[in-house]
Amino acid sequence: MSTEDMENVTGAAIRRRRTELGLSQAQVAEASGVNTRQIRRYEAGEQQPLLSVGIAIARALRMNVLELVGDLPSHRVDLTGEWWMSWQTSNDGSDQVTAQTVQFMQQDDLIAIQTTSRGTVNDPGGTRVPLTLEEGGYHWRGELRLWDNRLLIGWYAANDGGVASKGSLYFGLHTHGEDARGIWTGTSHDGDLLSGWGALGKSEEQVVRLVNDLKSTRGIKALRTAATFEGEPDDQ
């Protein structure tokens, strides 16, 4: 790619992203510490920003610096919409698989998550029934970062009053973005620091099945209590 082509790509990337965010050139300039006239020149393809300046602009526009030179795929999968997520967790020491609806709001490779239901769980007879807050059906929010259209890595935190649960998320995404399987680590309804299987999909039945498949093929030991604070290893 020639210098002229790179300048055109970089300028177009800055202009496109700025427009997506509804920002003026002056606002981008202020956020990045760059003169407004320079932002105008970059967008017009008249100049190419130095690396340090490009990093500052990318940070101000919440984009990957590689996007400024067209070095990231343009076919990023779009996961915006309502999904089902299922979790292997515990309640009063008993393993259980919950499922709930969540809303994904994606902007480039950053995905904001918010639950839209408290979820369901199996009753003693095996029927899916609604979860209550007391049973661990709390609302939460979080963020996921999409990496190479293959991985979703992020965090979650409860936003129901009195619930302190929070932790990390790691999912492997299906090739076409149809579902994802992974693991969560954090505090559970019981208050312990645990790790369990998780799944993302388009239906309650699908995600519950995916988590149960992980339990049967990868092992129930994905769910375990962390070592104690005194440093003693977990004996489970």
Image (cartoon, helix red, strand yellow):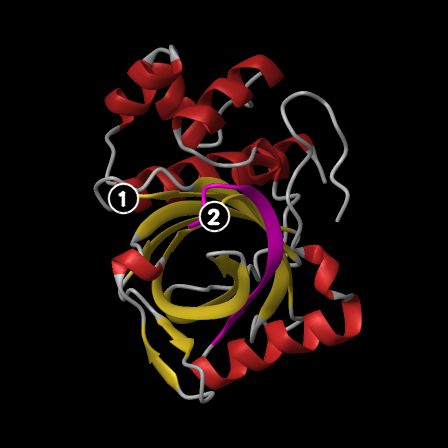
Q: What residue span does the magenta drawing correspond to?
A: 189-201
- Front one among 205 and 173: 205
Q: Position of residue 88 (x, y in %)?
A: 56, 63
Quadrant placement of the N terminus: top right
C-alpha separation, residue under disc 1 versus residue under disc 2: 14 Å
Q: Is residue 37 above or below residue 23?
A: above
Mark 2: which amino acid?
Ser
At 61% from the left edge and 56% from the top edge, which residue is drawn? 196
Q: Position of residue 131 (x, y in %)?
A: 31, 69
Circle 1 sits in a helix, a strand or a loop, which is it?
loop
Q: Is residue 3 above or below residue 5?
A: above
> Which label belongs to residue 188?
2
At 37% from the left edge and 69% from the top edge, which residue is drawn? 100
Q: Can the viewer see residue 14?
A: yes
Q: Is residue 215 left or right of residue 140?
A: right
Q: Is residue 27 above or below residue 95?
A: above
Q: Can the viewer see residue 203?
A: no
